[in-house]
Image (cartoon, rainbow, N blue to C red):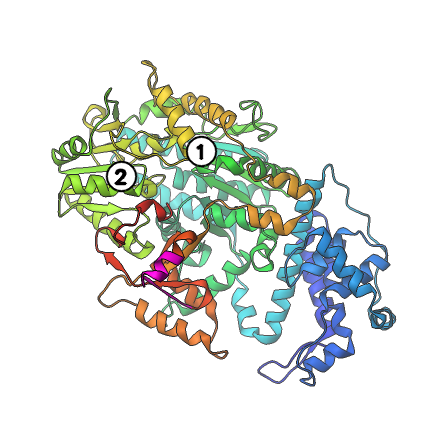
Amino acid sequence: MYAHSENAQGGKHSLLEHLHEVAGLAQKFTDKFQAGPWGYLAGLLHDAGKADLRFQSYLAGETPRGPEHSSVGAVLAMQRRYWEGLAFVLVGHHGGLPAPAHLKERLNQKSREDYVYKLFQQLERLLPLPPPPLQPSFNSPRQAELFLRLLFSALVDADFLDTERHFHPEKSQLRERPYDLARLARRLDEDQATRFSSTPKTPVNRARQEIYHACLEAAAQPPGIFRLTVPTGGGKTRSGLAFALRHAARHGKSRVIVALPYTSIIDQTAQVYREILGPEHVLEHHSALTFPEEEENFVQNQWARLAAENWDAPLIVTTTVQLFESLLSNRPSACRKLHNLVNGVLILDEVQTLPPFLLAPILEVLQQMVDHYGVTLVLSTATQPALAETTSPYLKGLRGEIWEIVPEPARYFQTLKRVTYEIPAEPWSWERIAREMAKASQCLAVVNTKTDALALLAALNDPGAFHLSTRLCMAHRRQVLREIKARLAEGRPCRVVATQVVEAGVDLDFPLVLRALGPLDRIVQAAGRCNREGRLAPQEARVIVFQPEAGKTPTGDYRTGHDLAAALLKHPKVDLHEPKVYETYFRELYQAVDTDKHKINALREALNFPEVAARFRLIEEDTVPLVVRWPREDSPVEGLLTALGALRDPKGGEPRPLLRRLQPYLVNVRRRLLADYQRQGLVRELPLGLWEWLGEYHEVQGLVESGLDPEDLVV
């Protein structure tokens, strides 16, 4: 009996060998959270249905398709009185974790097939099954739900890996990369010492070094939940990693995962880490990432592709979207990596950007990962939200002790005070803002919407001005950011109008920043782009927080945050350099919004995995990706579109590499606009759910369509 058809060498894959190999791997993965017997059972039963002679005929090419096989092991598990939760994992290992009603239907249907019982008798002879392990005990249904997700992850990854070993043994060899986190920690320390010795001993650099050493000292603390509260420009990218690597090495943690809110800041963070630790130790994984095909670094790129599938790497840099939508997905490919979060150090950078409407389920999952799966959690930001139950009574937040990594962080907010806030009493017109920008050779204006950005660009009337928003595809934004950084470094004129895409970690340094009134944390993040390196006296570095006379404010949680900030800033003694201000602000925000808007926790209690996955979206709008032709000259898009068209042919190739390479050339628009675009001839349908934009794409404004409200493009 066989599990898979012939490989390139003509060898078939023995079914019994496959079941035992997957069982061993799944046991290894689940041993990390004391569930080895259940991992072993899941691996042993997952493809038991392939023993069906009809499936063997299918593998031999004698029939066009085989019978559904995933449910057989689940029926057998129920007959042997194994824990019923195992059935979710077995039935879902190809198609995804099912809902209870669908699971029951599948099991009932399969158990009515006479042939199944004959198959069981055959399996009993060939595949001796152990007695039922001790059933896991849980304090809540949601605890059982997360356990099933991690058991599912271990089985799926084990199945993928053993199948890959049969069909592509060369890939299995590429995956084998041992690493030593203690050695990586030492490499970072050496780089930090070299860096500090070669930089001027300014107050900013001395503060950064103190923060770094505080992180090293705190790494000895027992695993748990930590806060890294560091003002913008305080070096938390390096210091947070220093804590994580030292803590991981000291406490036997398996890896470090750094999750950031925006792809625009992942690039620079991952690049910093690669330069220090070497590219072979850093996996950058997000939707806008491509893996070049050039021969140079080919092996490294191949490893990165493979490691992205299951996060088997020492340091992973990813997005919060990738992290949490995987944690609450039901699909095998998304869940495959989850077991590698166990016993890891997880840094949530810019943690204040977690969406309030999903905060309750996010915090509940994080607490479980800390309590039951050995995760050390680091909440990193300059504007700490009130995520603990003790500080936010209206939010079922994080429980237990939360340790401050840097003692008395408030003093560094004063030491690293680099800007002076100005808050005009009267609203400003776009023309008034443009006049203020025109007085400065270098300045940044951040507004709340893309409509406002276009209005300010028009009022500025500066042909050399830059624009950054999601009207520009990722590749375009990256090029604009490179040009902005070059101009700033060379002291050339540089005026930028942007939406929030430049906030939270984008490494820019302007002498003047203007920020439209918005949520308080967004204002402070924009201020982090002003006098970032402390070259100016605080009174020379201005952050003007203005109320646009004709501006728009996004609805929902953003509007709530805007209104709370407006009320807070009216207090004459409010000090935005005092960290406690943000705790107060977030406590009021979480009281004002529904932190489980889509009732995710109730669905998790009901084990409704597909519905949880459907409702849990960090970006709420249903969107359609449009491929844009940028740049016009020497664009790789033309060749990629040709290759994409070839996928209409059944033998046209593997789509995933193409999708990855197209990601930097996508602009997302709201799905409800698609019919209008089709009628106007502005889009052309492509394979894989993509569309090509046939309308104008402007070198400054990005995607343009006459009569289109820019807010129809997703922020």
Cα separation between marks 2 and 1: 19 Å
Picture quadrant where residue 443 is located: top left
Please report the residue visible at 35 percent of the width from the left and 61 percent of the height from the top. 679
Picture quadrant where residue 55 is located: bottom right
Residue named by callout 2: 452
Q: Give coordinates of residue 599: x percent, y percent.
A: 60, 39
**Residue 1 visible somewhere in the drawing:** no
The mark found on residue 557 in the picture is 1
Which is nearer the eye, 645 or 151?
645
- Answer above or below: position of 316 versus 515: below
Q: Residue furthest front?
A: 679
Please report the residue visible at 77 percent of the width from the left and 45 percent of the height from the top. 136
Task: Name the quadrant of the N terminus.
Answer: bottom right
- Answer above or below: position of 49 versus 97: below
- The residue type indicated by label 2 comes to Asp
Task: Name the quadrant of the C terminus.
Answer: top left
Provide the secondary structure element on which disc 2 rests.
helix
Q: Give coordinates of residue 417: x percent, y percent.
A: 29, 25
**Residue 215 visible somewhere in the drawing:** yes
Please report the residue visible at 58 percent of the width from the left and 38 percent of the height from the top. 361
Provide the secondary structure element on which disc 1 rests.
helix
- Answer above or below: position of 585 versus 439: above
Please report the residue visible at 54 percent of the width from the left and 43 percent of the height from the top. 345
Q: Is residue 185 magenta?
A: no
- The residue type indicated by label 1 comes to Asp
Q: Give coordinates of residue 179: x percent, y percent.
A: 52, 56
In the image, the segment drawn in magenta is: 675-686
Tell me if mark 1 has few (under 14), some (14-19) or many (20+) residues whose alpha carbon lies within 10 angstroms of its own: some
Left or right side of 13 for 510: left
